[in-house]
């Protein structure tokens, strides 16, 4: 049998060390950091620019790691997960 993913609208942003003039991190991500559902590493003004920035996302399936350039997605039930940029581009398109 073959299946097609139902068309759903998700919220997402591309994880970066700093904003770099792009749209900032959404409130739902900041809330997850405050709850310790997401742990940031080597970000902000005290981060070492010679080392990679990343975050750990605690999910029901375990800990997911997002590197700079990965997309952080908030699913339909508020769950967070990460997606590599090339997979995100092949799977998602902008919605109104």
Image (cartoon, grey):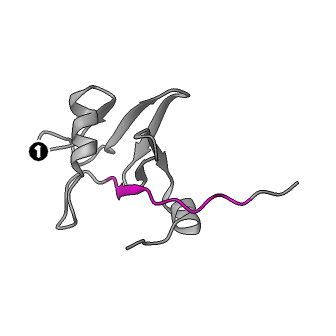
Q: Position of residue 63 (x, y in %)?
A: 47, 29
Instruction: Name the image quarter holding residue 48.
Output: top left
List x then y, in percent, for residue 29: 28, 43
* Rendering quarter of residue 69: bottom left
Quickly name the residue at label 1: 45
Rendered residue at 33%/28% (across/down): 37
Chain part drawn in magenta: 4-15
Residue 69 visible in image: no
Name the one closer to the observer, 8 or 91. 8
Looking at the image, which is closer to me, 81 or 7?
A: 7
Q: Residue at x 48, y 60 (%)?
A: 85
Q: Residue furthest left?
A: 45
Say which residue appears at 46% left-offset and 60% top-offset. 9
Q: Along the line of sight, which residue is nearer the eye, 77 or 50?
A: 77
Q: Majority secondary structure of the magenta segment?
A: loop
Specify whether 90 is left or right of 74.
Answer: right
Q: Position of residue 75 (x, y in %)?
A: 46, 46
Vertical order, 8 against 73 (above or below):
below
At which x and y percent is residue 71?
A: 42, 54
- Dot 1 alpha-carbon crowd within 10 angstroms: few under 14, some 14 to 19, many 20 or more: few
Judged left or right of residue 35, residue 66 is right
Q: Element type at marker 1?
A: loop
- Residue at image x 88%, y 54%? 1
Q: In the drawing, does residue 94 fall left or right of residue 90?
A: left
* The C terminus - image quarter: bottom left
Asked whether the viewer can see residue 78, the reply is: yes
């Amino acid at each position: 049998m073959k299946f097609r993913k139902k068309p759903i609208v998700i919220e997402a942003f591309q994880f970066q060390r700093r904003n770099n003039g792009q749209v900032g991190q959404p409130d739902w991500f900041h809330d997850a950091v405050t709850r310790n559902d997401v742990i940031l590493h080597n970000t902000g003004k005290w981060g070492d620019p010679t080392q990679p920035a990343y975050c750990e996302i605690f999910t029901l399936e375990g800990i997911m790691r997002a590197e700079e350039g990965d997309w952080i997605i908030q699913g339909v039930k508020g769950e967070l997960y990460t997606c590599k940029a090339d997979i995100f581009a092949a799977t998602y398109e902008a919605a109104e």
